Image (cartoon, helix red, strand yellow):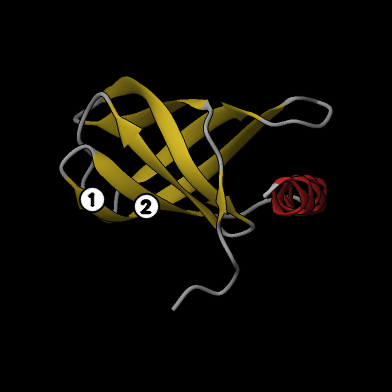
């Protein structure tokens, strides 16, 4: 059971993961967004438990969200990511984005 609702959210996402001394980057599309996480289909596979850096556009200023997350599940190229430590400002922005998405559906 999720702690917060998820909303349909289609945007391009960039995911970076540090593996074996190198940073690997893959791209994809988001499918859903909540205040505590995001779902996406990516161009590369991630493993559950990996910590990644995310960057994706949001519909409010500053129009981009950069945050770290942990991979909670991975099913082929589709994965669920839970946001890690966020600033108060990032939490406020995610809440505002979720309000916009909730009102759009």
- Taking the view exactly as shown, the residue that stands out farthest to the left is 76
Residue at disc 1, secondary structure? strand
Q: Position of residue 90 (x, y in %)?
A: 74, 46
- Marks 1 & 2, CB-CB < 8 Å contact: yes
Position of residue 1 in the picture relative to residue 95 (left or right): left
Name the residue at 56% across, 74% down.
3
- Kindly indicate the quadrant of the structure image that contains residue 61: top right
- Kindly indicate the quadrant of the structure image that contains residue 17: top left
Residue at disc 2, secondary structure? strand
Q: Position of residue 53 (x, y in %)?
A: 47, 35
Residue placed most toward the observer, 58 or 53: 58
Of the two numbered discs 1 and 2 on the same chain, state the one appearing first in sequence: 1
Q: Which residue is mark 2?
A: 80
Q: Dot 1, crowdedness within 10 Å: few (<14), some or many (≥20)?
A: some
What is the distance, in whole Å, between disc 1 and disc 2 at their CAs?
7 Å
Q: Which residue is mark 1?
A: 74
Q: Position of residue 29 (x, y in %)?
A: 42, 29
Name the residue at 75% across, 30% down.
59
Q: Dot 2, crowdedness within 10 Å: few (<14), some or many (≥20)?
A: many
């Amino acid at each position: 059971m999720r702690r917060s609702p998820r909303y349909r959210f289609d945007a391009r996402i960039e995911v970076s993961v540090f593996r074996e001394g190198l940073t690997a980057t893959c791209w994809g599309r988001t499918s859903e967004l909540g205040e505590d996480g995001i779902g996406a289909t990516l161009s590369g596979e991630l493993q559950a438990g990996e910590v990644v850096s995310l960057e994706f556009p949001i519909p409010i200023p500053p129009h981009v969200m950069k945050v770290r997350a942990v991979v909670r599940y991975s099913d082929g190229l589709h994965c669920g990511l839970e946001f890690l430590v966020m600033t108060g400002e990032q939490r406020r922005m995610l809440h505002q984005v979720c309000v916009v998405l909730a009102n759009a559906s």
